[in-house]
């Protein structure tokens, strides 16, 4: 019974993890490569000095999508005690690291403490699922996606420093287009996932067409 359940949940766990990371990665790039641009656009130029803090926090943020829906998977398995221990360990680690790092590094120290404690718990939960249910998200296609994303973020960061890119809307739009073109042709998605992507794209185009027709009818009346 348990093995059958794992066989059913495993592929879902792997696919949802891959898709979550695939679509959150562009947001991570915006926060990691262009933190000054993002902070300036949202809060004003006086907050651009917090770029390093945002860059560190974005690393903690991306671990959540990269390691997948661990919390919900463990909750579904009925191991709520482990989740409580994880929460307590994360809080304790965060407090300890804040106590050590904040006096010397200030806000940057606090950001490091939060990111490290958060990422560590994600790793622990992934190991727990692997040990208890023999499941993990790191399929061959997911590893390929990981290498592609690492290369792209390093390339974007290096290009930003060398060419003094500022993260304008045009630059970020170009990145999004290149990113999804690479994903399309790098065999990151299998046939079933590509079929799913086509159906989602078709549904989005249909909804857009409907909205346009409704707007044109409203203008005509």
Image (tube, rainbow, N blue to C red):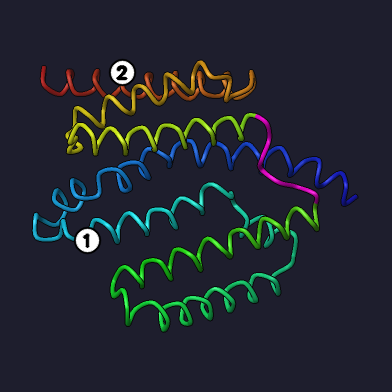
- With respect to residue 121, does 73 lie above or below? above
Rendered image quadrant of residue 181:
top left
Residue 138 on the magenta segment: yes
Q: Residue at x 10, y 55 (%)?
A: 44
Q: Position of residue 8 (x, y in %)?
A: 77, 41
CA separation in Å, label 2 and label 1: 41 Å
Rendered image quadrant of residue 77:
bottom right
Could you say which is closer to the camera, residue 162 or residue 87? Answer: 162
Q: Which residue is mark 1?
A: 50
Q: Residue at x 18, y 19 (%)?
A: 217
Estimate how packed mark 1 is, as few (under 14), some (14 to 19) or many (20 or more) residues with alpha carbons within 10 Å. Answer: some
Estimate how packed mark 2 is, as few (under 14), some (14 to 19) or many (20 or more) residues with alpha carbons within 10 Å. Answer: few
Residue 15 on the magenta segment: no
For label 1, the SS is helix
The furthest residue to the right: 1
Left or right side of 81 for 44? left
Q: Residue at x 63, y 22 (%)?
A: 190
Bounds of the magenta segment: 134-140
Could you say which is closer to the camera, residue 148 or residue 198? Answer: 148
Left or right side of 106 for 150? right
Q: Position of residue 113 (x, y in %)?
A: 43, 71
Q: Position of residue 86 (x, y in %)?
A: 62, 72
Q: Main secondary structure of the magenta part?
A: loop
Which quadrant, please, contains the C terminus? top left
Could you say which is closer to the camera, residue 12 or residue 117? Answer: 117
Q: Which mark is residue 61?
A: none
Q: Which residue is mark 2?
A: 209
Could you say which is closer to the camera, residue 91 or residue 215? Answer: 91
- Numbered-mark total: 2
Q: Residue at x 58, y 79 (%)?
A: 88
């Amino acid at each position: 019974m348990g093995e059958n359940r794992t066989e059913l949940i495993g592929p879902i766990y792997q696919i949802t993890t891959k898709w979550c990371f695939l679509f959150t990665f562009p947001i991570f790039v915006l926060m990691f490569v262009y933190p000054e641009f993002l902070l300036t656009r949202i809060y004003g130029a006086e907050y651009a000095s917090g770029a390093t803090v945002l860059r560190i926090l974005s690393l903690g943020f991306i671990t959540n999508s990269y390691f997948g829906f661990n919390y919900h998977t463990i909750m579904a398995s009925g191991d709520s005690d482990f989740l409580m221990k994880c929460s307590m360990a994360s809080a304790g680690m965060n407090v300890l690291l804040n106590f050590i790092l904040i006096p010397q590094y200030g806000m940057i120290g606090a950001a490091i403490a939060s990111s490290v404690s958060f990422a560590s718990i994600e790793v622990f939960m992934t190991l727990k699922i692997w040990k208890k249910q023999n499941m993990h998200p790191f399929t061959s296609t997911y590893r390929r996606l990981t290498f592609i994303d690492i290369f792209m973020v390093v390339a974007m960061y290096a290009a930003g420093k060398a060419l003094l890119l500022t993260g304008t809307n045009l630059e970020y739009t170009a990145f999004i287009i290149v990113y999804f073109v690479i994903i399309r042709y790098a065999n990151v998605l299998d046939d079933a996932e590509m079929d799913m992507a086509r159906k989602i794209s078709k549904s989005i185009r249909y909804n857009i067409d409907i909205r346009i027709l409704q707007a044109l009818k409203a203008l005509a009346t």
